[in-house]
Image (tube, rainbow, N blue to C red):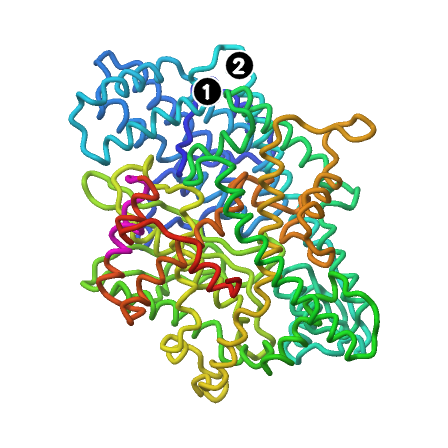
Amino acid sequence: MRKKTIVTAGLAATLLSACALSDKTSDESDTNNPFFTEYATPFGVPPFDKIKIEHYKPAIVKGIEEHTKEIEAIANRKEEPAFENTIVALDQSGRLLDRVVTVFFGQNSANTNDEMEAISREISPLLSQHRDDISLNPTLFARVKALYEARESLSLDKEQAKLLEETYKGFVRGGANLNADDQAKLRELNSQLSLLQLTFGQNMLKETNDFRLVIDNKDDLSGLTEAQIANAAEAAKRAGLEEGKWLFTLQNPSIMPFLQNSDRRELREKIFKGYIMRGNNDNGNDNKDIVKQLVTLRLEKAKLMGYADYASFVLEERMAKKADNVYALLDKIWEPALKVTKQELSDIQAEIKKEGSTFAAEGWDWRYYFEKAKKAKYNLDESQIRPYLQLENVREGAFYVANKLYGITFTPIKEIPLPHPEALAFECKESDGTHLGVLYMDFFPRASKRGGAWCGGYRGQTYKEGKRVAPVITIVCNFTPPAAGEPALLSVDEAETLFHEFGHALHGLFRDVHYYGISGVPRDFVELPSQVMEHWVLEPEVLKVYARHYRTKEVIPAALVEKLNRGSKYGQGFATTEYLAASFLDMDYHVLKNIPANEEKQNLNVLSFEAGTLSGRGLPAQIPPRYRSTYFNHTMGGGYTAGYYSYIWSEVLDADAFEAFKETGDIFHPEVAARFRKYVLTPGGIDDAMEMYKNFRGQEPGVAPLLKNRGLD
């Protein structure tokens, strides 16, 4: 759920002092800071071309000054509390501050530098403090509580009633009912957690960027495709290395193809270990102690709030409700996934034996020999598919699916400020031409961008003076960049990632709610709109539209599609167990009711705890969890804390949801699509998540479609 940023006068003074200490603080007048005036840009997008680093802190300070006056006015009204003068006023407050931090944190993820990171370290605890200042404001809470207790007599509609409920719960979960001493302790914990989470992510980015595998012997490129070699040469050139060198990094588009194709086992080992040792090198970027502190402080916060463990505190607001339900789902999938994984390992060992070797496969061998096993079984390897997955065509394929389902269109926007020069902009319109929103897309890795892929926003959908304010959405990825003179060609996994993030974008574009406070959905529901989109990627009807050879323009041959479909489930043992292992690890940390001591009577030993979690469940030694503790930013950086299970929880929903289309015999069935848009994509958090799903499907989902899709049934 989107959280409002609210502070009091005390925090404003703190921030002003902090900014005064910085020699980077701008003395520019209000008129020179683009945040201080309405954006004179197409569709009101942020003026990225005019925003400078020195604009952020002054804008945050001014935003807090304005916001403080708004909060004081709401809390100190002489009129009796009413829905409009308290709940709506609170929901609509802080627009300037919200506008600044939305741009800042969006850019800090996609285009950061040392100055941006320094600012984020400075403001993160302050933003944590201002969130506490509103949650712990007794006068304001008294007004909210009075309305909540009188809610049955207020004649509120469904949306208003939900906003009141969520606002009240936000105060309670923010500590409003704690005594003064406990509130002071909560403030301290929140400030520490905020800074630790930020530091964890910054360390991870540095560890990823600092590793380089430089090859200067052409023989050591054996096994790599021409495109991979060309990309590595281009990467070396960008890094300032002399000609005749090839650079490989820990960015997924670089390391994963290397692990799949390189014939040099010792080099695979080197880059693999570089990847899984991020944050665990006993240097200035080491994250082990940060993980220990985060787990300890989160448990302390949970107990302060009256919960036995942190997972209980978090899951109360999720579909899962409690940890037992999460473990029940994970366990149900773990055993069949482990069984398939062991068969895949047997296939890998057979490939090693074919080469006349007898060594036991290690982690750096899995992808390499798995590709050989897949080719032997299905006569299929990734290099056969990539030429048909030109990035621009895959993107247009996603647009095509959205148009067929919902009638919407995406048109390039040429003259518009961009969040980065490499980004693209599109206007989304309804079938009748009504403007729905702006979509940015930023596809390729760079040192200033954190890893992975995500969908965010530079403005959320809301209403102002009765008129809909359209959202500004951004999709950020780290796809394989194009070789010199060639287009970007995606893997199947990257194509699915594009559709996945596009599904998040559709959720943001279609949302139609009147209040910020009910715009979000539970974390374990939020992946449903994204993951359901992945089902269309390999559908023959869709492939015919976008899967065309980048040179010949030939549509992908039916025989290759057949091989692709037959082989698509192969490898799901590995994919499922590495994901579930990370989900178990996340949960195991956060169901702790006491921090375990090791032999030296010291607090949590992160590496020992991780090893126990994984080996105790029988995870093969060759498979690390998708994210080890020291680079598990989903949970340690916040966002998916006690929530990484959400992807598989939502997959139960999305697999069942796609069945609704397939049962009609039409994967674009208009009535099913209309129901999905109406009941899942549009309402935000107005309804209970499971009720939203049942409104669409007519029943709760089962796990059988998921197991079938993954080939685990």
Between 585 and 529, the residue placed more toward the observer is: 585
Quadrant location of residue 327? top right
Q: Looking at the image, is 27 positioned above or below residue 631? A: above
Question: Residue 40: x and y, percent?
Answer: 32, 49
Q: Mark 1: few, some, or many residues within 10 Å (few <14, many ≥20)?
A: many
Give the labeled residue for mark 2.
182
Residue occupying image coordinates x 28% and y 65%: 405
Query: Is 149 on the left-hand or right-hand side of 364?
Result: left
| In the image, residue 686 lies in the stretch drawn in magenta | yes
Q: Nearer the viewer, residue 582 or 417?
A: 582
In this orientation, does residue 95 appear?
Answer: yes
Residue type of the residue flagged with mark 2: Asp
Q: Which residues are magenta?
A: 675-687
Q: Disc number at residue 175?
A: 1
- Of the numbered discs 1 and 2, the one sitting upstream in the chain is 1
Q: Tell me where residue 480 appears, x and y as whole percent.
A: 58, 68
SS category of the residue bearing label 2: helix
Residue shown at 33%/14% (left/top)?
Answer: 142
Residues under numbered marks 1 and 2 in contact, where contact means CB atoms less than 8 Å apart:
yes
Q: Choose between 525 and 408: the one closer to the eye.
A: 525
